[in-house]
Image (cartoon, grey):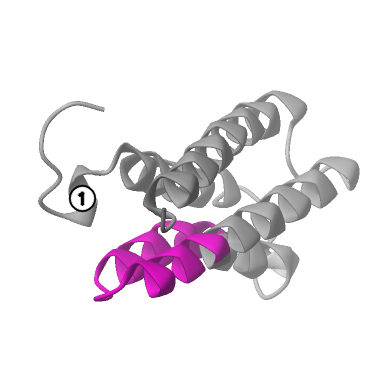
Amino acid sequence: MTGKINSYKDLIVWQQAMDLAVSTYSLTKTWPKEELYGLTSQIRRSATSIPANIAEGYGRDNRGSYQQFLRIAQGSLKEFETHLQIAQRIGVATHGRAEHLLLAAEAIGKMLRQLIIKIAPK
């Protein structure tokens, strides 16, 4: 990453997590209405939680809190992946669209791990 980071909005991991959340809303628009308060709600909540926790952690005044929120974002990411895999298994999400989002989630997970390592106390 090049350039100075002045805001969480400058973080590529946050930008990609935002894209994942937006793509999740697009994907779930076509899901059955009976899933609205079940799987649809759960996957949307977990997807939006990822960039939200990255942003909240960035706003904290110490590295320990920031790391903790990045770990919470990782947990939300794993929750998202699980919900998406369930949606695939029950036939709500098509394989192609789900795989695209799972690959994006994997890349976000790698960036989160690297960021956690980078800000760890030396």
Q: Quadrant of residue 110?
A: top right
- From the viewer's perspective, is residue 63 above or below residue 7? below
**Residue at 69% from the left image edge and 28% from the top image edge:** 99
- From the viewer's perspective, is residue 114 above or below residue 8? above
Q: How many numbered dots are placed on residues in this image?
A: 1
Given residues 111 and 114, the one toward you in this image is 114
Q: Position of residue 72 (x, y in %)?
A: 55, 67
47 on left or right of 2: right
Q: Is residue 28 magenta?
A: no
Q: Position of residue 121 (x, y in %)?
A: 41, 58
10 on left or right of 85: left
**Residue at 65% from the left image edge and 35% from the top image edge:** 102
Given residues 102 and 78, the one toward you in this image is 78
Q: Main secondary structure of the magenta part?
A: helix
Q: Position of residue 26 (x, y in %)?
A: 48, 45
- From the viewer's perspective, is residue 2 above or below residue 67? above
**Residue at 12% from the left image edge and 31% from the top image edge:** 3
- From the viewer's perspective, is residue 107 above or below residue 58? above
Q: Quadrant of residue 46?
A: bottom right
SS at mark 1 in the image: helix
Q: Quadrant of residue 75?
A: bottom right
Q: Position of residue 58 (x, y in %)?
A: 28, 64
**Residue at 38% from the left image edge and 60% from the top image edge:** 54
Q: Which residue is mark 1?
A: 9
103 on left or right of 121: right
- Mark 1: give few (<14), some (14-19) or many (20+) Cα within 10 Å: some
Amino acid type at mark 1: Lys
> In the image, which residues are magenta?
47-71
State which quarter of the image contains the N terminus.
top left
Given residues 5 and 12, the one toward you in this image is 5
